[in-house]
Structure formats: C-alpha cells, structure tokens
Image (cartoon, rainbow, N blue to C red):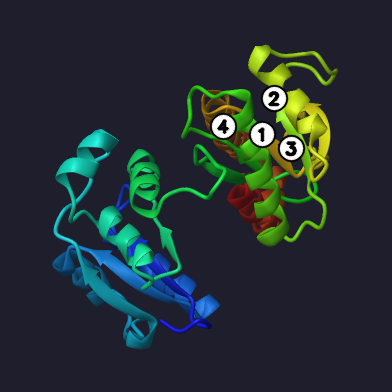
C-alpha cells in the first residue's frame, strides 16, 4: 500500500446479513470514493455474494479477498472472541491495519468485539484511556456527533473529557466543522445540573482552552442543530440512540398510516411528495 492509496479492511461477515449485504455495500463505496476494499471473511461466502452481483459491479481492481475462517456470533463475549477466534474476520481485519496493509476497519458486526479487538490489537491513542462508540445524528441544521453510545457503561469524568477531545477532532477533520460546539448531555441547561459524573465532567470541559464548550445539553435539544458534539457515558448514550431510532421509525409508520387512510386527496398528495418522504425516511 502506497501513502496515497486508501485501502479499507472490511469485516465481510459482520452484520445481520453478512456478505450478502456487506459485499455489495463495500463495492458501492469503493466505486464512489476510489478506495480499495479488502473483503475479510470466509472465502466461499464472500465469492458467493460477489457472484450474485452484475458483472459491471465486480471490478476486480476495487477489491481483494482476505480469507478468515471464523465468524463472530452476536451472543459471544468479547473476551472469548479475543481468546478463541484468532482467525475471525474482525481480528484478521484489525491485523491488516496493524501490519500497514489497510488504513482503517469497517464493521457492521459485534460492536463489543470491534472495540475489544481494536484496543488489544491496534492499541489506543496516547492519552486516551478508553475508546468510545460514536454516531452521527441528523438535526434541523447539520449532522451532530454523539458519543459514547455503548462502549463504556460506566465512566469517570476524565473519560468524558477525553471523549470531548476525540469528538471535537472528529467533527473538525471528518465533518468539516471549523470550531465544533461541544456539550454534555444532562437533565438541565444550567451549570450544576446533573449527577456527580456530569457535574465533574462539566468542570473539566469548561477549563479546556482548546474546546468550544457550550455547557449542558438536554435531550430535547439534541436535534436542534445548536450543538455539534455531545458527550455522555455509554449507558445514557445508548438509551438516547435507541430511543431516537425507535421514535423515528414510529413517526414514519404513523405518518404513512394516517396519510393512506385519510381519503383520496391525502393519498394523491403523498404520491406527489414521495421523493420528500423517501428522503425524510432515510434521514430518520
């Protein structure tokens, strides 16, 4: 791999549907970005997924297959995966990055395994004690980054401070925000609101000269677009994420039901606005 080439190691066995979804998705991303993907997984399953694609979508210059004999199941513990599944697709993908054969890993699989393998095979950034899972959420204005959403159920104040640093860097380098606005998820906007973790973390973030810290952010304000990065512990973040996913799905379902059961004119309006509804559905 040369310095100018973007090579991504893809966990082809990850996710609910494995190679049948991951492989075409990875190749679609490769075509649109110019990256090369290393499809890591059981070779027969990966080739079966490739064979189902139209010939025009199977440009061999865009991918290589890297065999990995073992598959991680969602119910397995990360410690067991590290110990007993050395040839799993996620471990092999991590080693490709460690060895310099790829620049990053993409996995839709077992998040605990991804975090554990990342920590023990790739290591951590100096000064960062714990990795965080982050998600990009849609807002009324521009995308917002929320972290942690599940990697660390219990945190200390300096962990949330480190999440703030990592989230700010991500928002600058990946989302393109010049000076990301940072907040901490709490039960009130005023300083002093929240539990001991939130209040102590607030004090650390407030003192940081290199962070644009706005203060507390309430759950109702996550989607206003008035903040770019929000930090919290993994328990709170995961609840917030799953609540958002469930609400978005329910709103879409209820809206569709009401429009289609309200007579001819709403149905015609729905058909005329189907492009906007499709875009809304993808967003939520």
**Disc on the earlier residue, 1 or 4:** 1
| Vertical comparison of 67 with 269: above or below | below
Quadrant of res 184? top right
Left or right placement of residue 62 versus residue 85 in this view: right
Q: Which residue is mark 3?
A: 223
Q: Position of residue 83 (x, y in %)?
A: 18, 42
Q: Are marks 1 and 2 in contact (CB under 8 Å)?
A: yes
Q: Nearer the viewer, residue 131 or 259?
A: 131
Q: CA distance from mark 4 to mark 3?
A: 17 Å
Q: What is the tally of numbered marks visible in this picture?
A: 4
Q: CA distance from mark 1 to mark 3?
A: 22 Å
- Mark closer to the observer (1, 4): 1
Name the disc covering residue 161, or none.
1
Q: Which residue is mark 2?
A: 201
Q: Position of residue 272 (x, y in %)?
A: 70, 57
Classed neighbour count for the residue bearing mark 3: other residues with Cα under 10 Å, few (<14), some (14–19), many (≥20): some
Q: Are marks 1 and 3 in contact (CB under 8 Å)?
A: no
**Disc on the earlier residue, 4 or 3:** 3
| Vertical comparison of 256 with 40: above or below | above
Classed neighbour count for the residue bearing mark 1: other residues with Cα under 10 Å, few (<14), some (14–19), many (≥20): many
**Disc on the earlier residue, 2 or 4:** 2
Q: Nearer the viewer, residue 132 or 146?
A: 132
Q: Position of residue 212 (x, y in %)?
A: 83, 42
Q: CA distance from mark 1 to mark 4?
A: 34 Å
Q: Which residue is mark 4?
A: 250
């Amino acid at each position: 791999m040369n310095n100018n080439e973007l090579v991504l190691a893809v966990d082809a066995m990850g996710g609910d549907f494995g190679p049948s979804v991951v492989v075409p998705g990875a190749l679609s991303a490769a075509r649109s970005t110019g990256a090369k993907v290393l499809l890591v997984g059981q070779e027969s399953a990966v080739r079966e997924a490739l064979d189902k694609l139209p010939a025009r979508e199977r440009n061999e210059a865009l991918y290589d297959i890297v065999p990995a004999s073992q598959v991680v199941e969602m119910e397995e513990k990360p410690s067991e995966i590290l110990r007993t599944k050395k040839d799993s697709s996620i471990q092999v993908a991590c080693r490709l990055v460690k060895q310099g054969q790829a620049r990053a890993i993409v996995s839709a699989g077992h998040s605990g395994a991804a975090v554990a393998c990342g920590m023990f095979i790739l290591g951590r950034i100096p000064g960062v004690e714990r990795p965080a899972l982050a998600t990009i959420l849609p807002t009324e204005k521009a995308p917002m980054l929320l972290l942690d959403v599940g990697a660390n159920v219990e945190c200390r104040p300096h962990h949330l401070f480190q999440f703030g640093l990592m989230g700010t860097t991500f928002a600058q380098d990946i989302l393109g925000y010049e000076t990301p606005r940072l907040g901490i998820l709490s039960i009130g906007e005023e300083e002093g609101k929240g539990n001991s973790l939130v209040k102590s973390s607030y004090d650390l973030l407030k003192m940081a000269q290199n962070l644009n810290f706005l203060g507390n952010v309430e759950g109702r304000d996550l989607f206003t677009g008035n903040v770019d990065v929000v930090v919290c512990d993994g328990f709170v973040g995961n609840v917030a994420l799953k609540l958002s996913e469930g609400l978005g799905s329910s709103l879409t379902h209820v809206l569709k039901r009401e429009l289609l059961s309200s007579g001819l004119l709403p149905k015609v309006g729905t058909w005329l606005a189907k492009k906007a509804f499709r875009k809304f559905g993808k967003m939520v």
